[in-house]
Image (cartoon, rainbow, N blue to C red):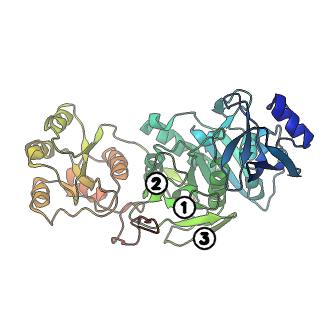
């Protein structure tokens, strides 16, 4: 066994255990049961790596009292298979997976521990073999971009690829994307894609396959299942809990990454998720656009790049707004405090910007809730200057939407009208009080 050496190799051989087998390890009156995993060169040489039923990997230090029993023979690890050939099934959906980069479109080299892009059809099947039971998969390696480097140009490139795949007969499209800016791309596609009648699903992973509890397989399975469903809009599919039990389906304009590392980092904001995926079955519990008759999808692309998202903070300097005007920015989205406020120290600069025909939209940095600029005098004063509220739209979504609208028109009143019009589910008709996350206190709390 190349991955394990010396005493560990001897222990495993004495138990007739090989990588992929289900084994039980006894140590200090404790038992650990799971799949025997390969060990990368970066991991401690005196540890055995097990994947538990929860999906987490653990390393167990080998000591004199350690015992190993083989419970049953496992299957060849999917991540190590080569040359997988999956027969096409006419009764299954044809799903195109477009790779743009990110953790989900990578694999681990267990010899070196390095992560590198992997996006052939066979490698996708290897990462999530369950998807072969769901759909016929084809893959397109469009680009390999860290999500922080996404741009309007790449959004358009992705949009064109989606349109081409759907119009050539794909039943749905999955876009493998880095998680950090996936919400921005989902919003951009939600506004660009017209006559959309099939699912377009963005998916990523929080933890690469070289880390404990990789979420690649379940997320891909959930995304392909959703892409085969009767959904007819853009969505994001990611883990719905910290366990490997289900994925949530989020509307593309209502989703936000809310945690740096948790597998269930993505949440729908100010709305319920569209639905969930569990055991290759989709359950929708929110109004949605349904899959429709085949119609040519159109791409209404174009983004004005000189639009700024400005976070309001104590002691924010007026020069921030003044410099945006000086640098010929075409639009500004304020991430205001509370119900939609900004300090009086910015009023003069805001007024000058609006007089220069620069639209200024107000969102809230509170994440949950709705802007209302009629409650306090500061909000009313900002409204009188010409700042307009965009209800409960996410700041990130508002930024993308304004970039998209300003490419189509520079007329101030038309920009205001379009920003306040619900185009792709970005504005809720009413505020919900059952979507705010509640803190679970300890039992003695």
Which residue is located at x 22 percent, y 54 percent? 337
Where's the C terminus, which quadrant? bottom left
Give the number of the disc on residue 190: 2
Where's the N terminus, which quadrant? top right
- Vertical arrangement, residue 429 with respect to residue 92, above or below: below
Which sits earlier in the primary sequence, circle 1 or circle 2? 2
Q: In the rendered image, which residue does mark 3 sit on?
A: 283
Q: Position of residue 271 (x, y in %)?
A: 42, 66
Say which quarter of the image contains residue 438.
bottom left
Which sits earlier in the primary sequence, circle 3 or circle 2? 2
Q: In the rendered image, which residue does mark 1 sit on?
A: 249
| Foreground residue among 279 and 439 | 439
Q: Position of residue 255 (x, y in %)?
A: 45, 56
Q: Can residue 69 be seen in this snapshot? A: yes
Q: CA distance from mark 1 to mark 2?
A: 15 Å
Q: Position of residue 355 (x, y in %)?
A: 11, 45
Q: Can residue 197 be seen in this snapshot? A: no
Which residue is located at x 21 percent, y 57 percent? 340
Which sits earlier in the primary sequence, circle 1 or circle 3? 1
Badge 2 density bin: few <14, some 14–19, many ≥20, Cα 10 Å: many
Of badges 1 and 2, nearer the viewer stands 1
378 left or right, relative to 121: left
| Foreground residue among 31 and 203 | 31
- Tag 2 secondary structure: helix
- Tag 3 secondary structure: strand
Which residue is located at x 18 percent, y 33 percent? 323
Badge 3 density bin: few <14, some 14–19, many ≥20, Cα 10 Å: some
- Tag 1 secondary structure: strand
Which residue is located at x 28 percent, y 64 percent? 370
Q: Position of residue 275 (x, y in %)?
A: 55, 67
Q: CA distance from mark 3 to mark 2?
A: 22 Å
């Amino acid at each position: 066994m190349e991955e394990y050496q010396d005493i560990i190799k001897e222990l495993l051989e004495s138990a007739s255990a090989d990588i992929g087998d289900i084994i039980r390890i006894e140590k200090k009156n404790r038992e650990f049961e799971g799949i025997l995993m390969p060990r990368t060169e970066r991991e401690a040489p005196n540890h055995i790596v097990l994947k538990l039923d929860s999906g987490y990997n653990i390393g167990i230090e080998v000591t004199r009292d350690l015992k190993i029993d083989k419970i049953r023979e496992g299957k060849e690890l999917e991540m190590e298979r080569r040359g997988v050939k999956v027969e096409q099934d006419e009764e299954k959906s044809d799903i195109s997976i477009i790779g743009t980069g990110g953790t989900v479109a990578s694999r681990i080299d267990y010899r070196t521990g390095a992560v590198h892009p992997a996006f052939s059809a066979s490698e996708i099947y290897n990462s999530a073999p369950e998807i072969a039971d769901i759909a016929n998969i084809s893959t397109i390696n469009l680009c390999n971009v860290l999500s922080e480097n996404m741009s309007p140009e790449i959004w358009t490139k992705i949009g064109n690829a989606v349109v081409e795949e759907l119009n050539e007969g794909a039943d749905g499209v999955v876009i493998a994307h880095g998680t950090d800016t996936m919400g921005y791309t989902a919003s951009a596609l939600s506004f660009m894609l017209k006559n959309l009648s099939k699912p377009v699903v963005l998916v990523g992973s929080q933890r690469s396959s070289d880390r404990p509890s990789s979420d690649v397989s379940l997320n891909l399975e959930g995304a392909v299942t959703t892409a085969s469903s009767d959904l007819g809009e853009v969505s994001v599919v990611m883990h719905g809990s910290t366990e490997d039990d289900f994925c949530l389906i989020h509307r593309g304009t209502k989703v936000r990454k809310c945690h740096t590392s948790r597998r269930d980092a993505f949440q729908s904001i100010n709305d319920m998720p569209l639905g969930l995926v569990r055991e290759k079955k989709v359950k929708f519990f929110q109004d949605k656009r349904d899959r429709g008759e085949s119609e040519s999808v159109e791409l209404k692309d174009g983004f004005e790049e000189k639009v700024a998202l400005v976070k309001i903070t104590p002691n924010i300097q007026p020069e921030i707004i003044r410099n945006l005007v000086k640098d010929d920015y075409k639009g500004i989205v304020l991430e205001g405090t509370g119900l939609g406020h900004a300090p009086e120290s910015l009023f003069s600069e805001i007024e000058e910007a609006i007089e220069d025909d620069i639209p200024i939209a107000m969102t809230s940095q509170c994440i949950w809730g709705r802007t209302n600029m009629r409650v306090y005098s500061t909000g009313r004063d900002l409204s009188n200057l010409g700042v307009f509220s965009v209800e409960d739209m996410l700041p990130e979504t508002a930024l993308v939407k304004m970039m998209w609208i300003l490419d189509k028109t520079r007329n101030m009143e038309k920009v205001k009208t379009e920003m306040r019009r619900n185009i792709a589910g970005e504005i809720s008709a009413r505020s919900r009080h059952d979507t705010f996350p509640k803190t679970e206190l300890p039992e003695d709390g």
